[in-house]
Amino acid sequence: MHLPVGSFEPLGDAGISGESRLLVFVVEDEEDIARLISHNLQAAGFEVQSFVSGASVVSEALREMPSLFLLDVMLPGADGFELCRQIRQTSTLSATPIIFLTAKTEEADRVKGLELGGDDYITKPFSPRELVARVRSVLRGVRKPLVNSEMLRVGDLEIDASSMTVQVQGRAVLTTVREFRLLEYLASHLGRVLTRNQLLDAVWKETPFVTPRSIDVYVRRLREKIETDPRHPRYLKTLRGIGYRFESPR
Ligand code: CA
């Protein structure tokens, strides 16, 4: 039995109780990699269903309602992007998180995957620990739908949407409206990679003449305000050539 999004038990308990195991659909045609993924996710307390192509993924997902999809990009038949598109167009699956598996050389593909509605990506070759951490991180973002609450709390940060104020370790920090909007958007998509174009659409929608690169300037300013060491950010991580991800410090 899989619990609906929003009522998950803490993931730490998932391996013990057995009843609160979260189901992950893994679509990967390379057998060795698929086995490695299943083994590590199962060891971490997840239930796994593996597929070697995308053919029956959507129909099975409608029956079983997985908590997350892990999609290889290069698949026989419909590729991972096409599958992502199908999942996002299926109303009961449209909010289910998707993580792509990509080869190191496919940087443009990573951006494409995120803009098609992927939540994150994992680059091959990956460490099993990183894989489990990314899956947990994306599921954490889903479990706490921060978007609808007035107050976002992440680590030592408090972001209050009603008064547009930010506190770091209980100390108020001044931001401009635009900096605030960017921070709020990033923090409400915890664990999710956002491309510069996605941030531009979300925060600078009505503003012409802002280029994706201007976001880097805002990010730098935000880091100076919220990070203890802006050069080694704990919250606002850069994904080179891709965009940014807001994380809850470990
Ligand atoms: Ca493949």
Image (tube, rainbow, N blue to C red):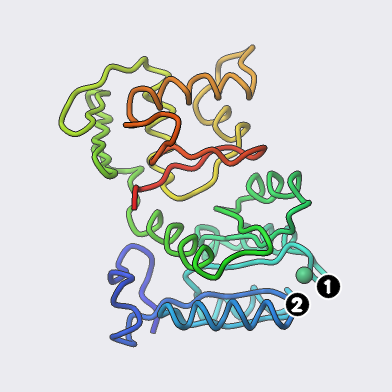
Q: Secondary structure at mark 2?
A: loop
Give the labeled residue for mark 1.
Answer: 76
Q: Nearer the viewer, residue 14 or 54?
A: 14
Q: Does the beta carbon of the residue at mark 1 sit less than 8 Å from ligand 1?
A: yes
Residue situated furthest bottom in the rendering: 18
Q: Which mark is residue 246?
A: none
Name the quarter where the N terminus is drawn: bottom left
Where is residue 172? Give x, y as percent: 20, 23
Q: Residues within 10 Å of mark 2 (few under 14, many from 20)?
A: some
Q: Is residue 218 above or below residue 55?
A: above
Q: Residue at x 30, y 85 (%)?
A: 16
* 1 or 2: tag closer to the N-terminus: 2
Q: Are marks 1 and 2 in contact (CB under 8 Å)?
A: yes
Give the labeled residue for mark 2.
Answer: 29
User: Given this view, does label 1 or label 2 mark the residue nearer the observer?
Assistant: 2
Apparent side of residue 188 relative to residue 237 in the rendered image (left or right): left
